[in-house]
Amino acid sequence: METRFSGTAGEIARFLERRATEPVNIPVLQPADPFLDMAGEDLRSRIFLTESETGDSLCLRPEFTIPVCRDHIAKNAQTPRRYGYLGEVFRQRREGGTGFLQAGIEDLGDPDLAAGDARSIADAHALLRHVLPHGQLQVVLGDQAVFDAVLEALGLPRGWQQKLARAFGTSDQLETALAELARPQNPAGQTGAVGKLATSGDQTSLERHIAGAMEQAGLPLTAGRSASEIAARMIEKQRLSETRLSADALEALRAFLAIRVPLKQASKTLMAFAADTGLDLGQRLDGFETRVREVGKHAGLVDDIVYDGAFGRALDYYTGLVFEIAVEGSERPLIGGGRYDRLLTMLGSDMDIPGVGFSVWLDRVDKLAGDA
């Protein structure tokens, strides 16, 4: 931990110690690219950017998951390992303020994914039970892997699967994407010669056309994306725009997203959905059911959890479990987390290291603790 804490923060610091986590100290100044690459460009307007003397893009630490994973890789540390943290992060938020305390646990390298998921939810649940003993906790759980399995079973092109996966958990973006699938339209700006070449799929001719237009406009061919990259993206965009989901497939996708049941009913509900729609969700459902059994081993936990087929979290690196915990009557979640099995490889690890974790917004917890 970065320093000694009192009050709610001190209680959480002691809780992390009792949960056998290894404290980790992360520098406040961080390279910005990993956050923008993994968390998406939308984060750019909400973090505090600067540059090093050599021109490298830096930022004030906006969260802990990515820095903790980078620190683990840099130290070439052994796994499994459980890291606990408590420190200040810096982000522009709708509720105001720029710097606030965040705590959490990152659980790296446990090969038993279902047990790791259940432990992460249980740790988060127990933490809030400790600091808010009288609050009625509400846990909402989603699964990126099950959603991906539905998209694959529907036979959507890979580009559409990625687009919908990125929108997962953001209702407005997801609804817009579903509307596009129901009523294909020509991509904006792809008309005339460019539109015809993109529609034909002739990448060589389109690349030549774009290179000529760039040269005529006085743009160096080495500036930004190359003509080849632009042409490939335009053709992909055209193909995606021409994809139409059948009425039955669209109805099946909407039916999945409408599922919201207590966790103890979720496995049966998903199996019934797969049977009714004829979709083969295979091992993803097996993994989901195994996780539910592991969660059931933690006394009293399963009764507070609802499974929501449409629930996701707005970070690109989640690969399976996603969850948030709130107190009944609160407008915003107090804890958010999930599984990110590809993140460490994307950050440079030469080994596949599974990971799962959660973060606590201490200012929100503090307010509720003070109101109690």
Image (cartoon, rainbow, N blue to C red):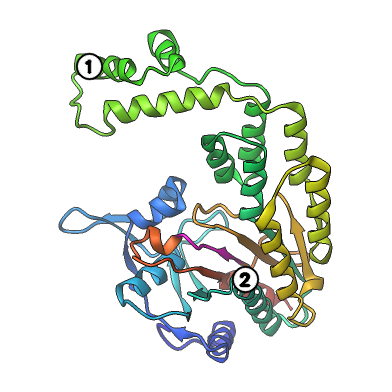
- Residue lying farthest to the left in this orientation: 54
Identify the residue at horizontal 79%, vertical 64% (top origin): 263
Does the image show residue 169?
no
Identify the residue at horizontal 64%, vertical 81% (top origin): 127
**Residue 338 within the magenta-colored segment of the rendering:** yes
Report the mark closest to the observer, 1 or 2. 2
Name the residue carrying label 2.
Answer: 117
Quarter placement of the N terminus:
bottom left
How many numbered circles are shown? 2
Query: Reading the chain from its start, which is encountered first: label 1 or label 2?
Result: 2
Residue 223 or 50: which is nearer the viewer?
Answer: 223
Q: As shown in the figure, which amino acid type bears the numbered disc 2?
A: Asp
Q: Secondary structure at mark 2?
A: helix
Q: Is residue 112 above or below residue 252?
A: below
Name the residue carrying label 1.
Answer: 217
Q: Is residue 47 above or below residue 369?
A: above
Other residues around mark 1 within 10 Å, as few (<14) / some (14–19) / many (≥20):
few
- The quarter of the displayed image where residue 160 is located: top right
* Residues at marks 1 and 2 touching, judged by CB atoms closer than 8 Å: no
Going by the image, does 55 lie left or right of 281? Answer: left
Going by the image, does 148 lie left or right of 82? Answer: right
Residue 97 or 231: which is nearer the viewer?
Answer: 231
Q: Secondary structure at mark 1?
A: loop
Going by the image, does 36 lie left or right of 286? Answer: left
Q: Is residue 322 above or below residue 177?
A: below
Does the image show residue 127?
yes
Identify the residue at horizontal 32%, vertical 64% (top origin): 30
Going by the image, does 152 lie left or right of 21? Answer: right
The percent position of residue 341, horizontal first and vertical second, equals 50, 63
The magenta segment is 336-342
Q: As shown in the figure, which amino acid type bears the numbered disc 1?
A: Ala
**Residue 205 within the magenta-colored segment of the rendering:** no
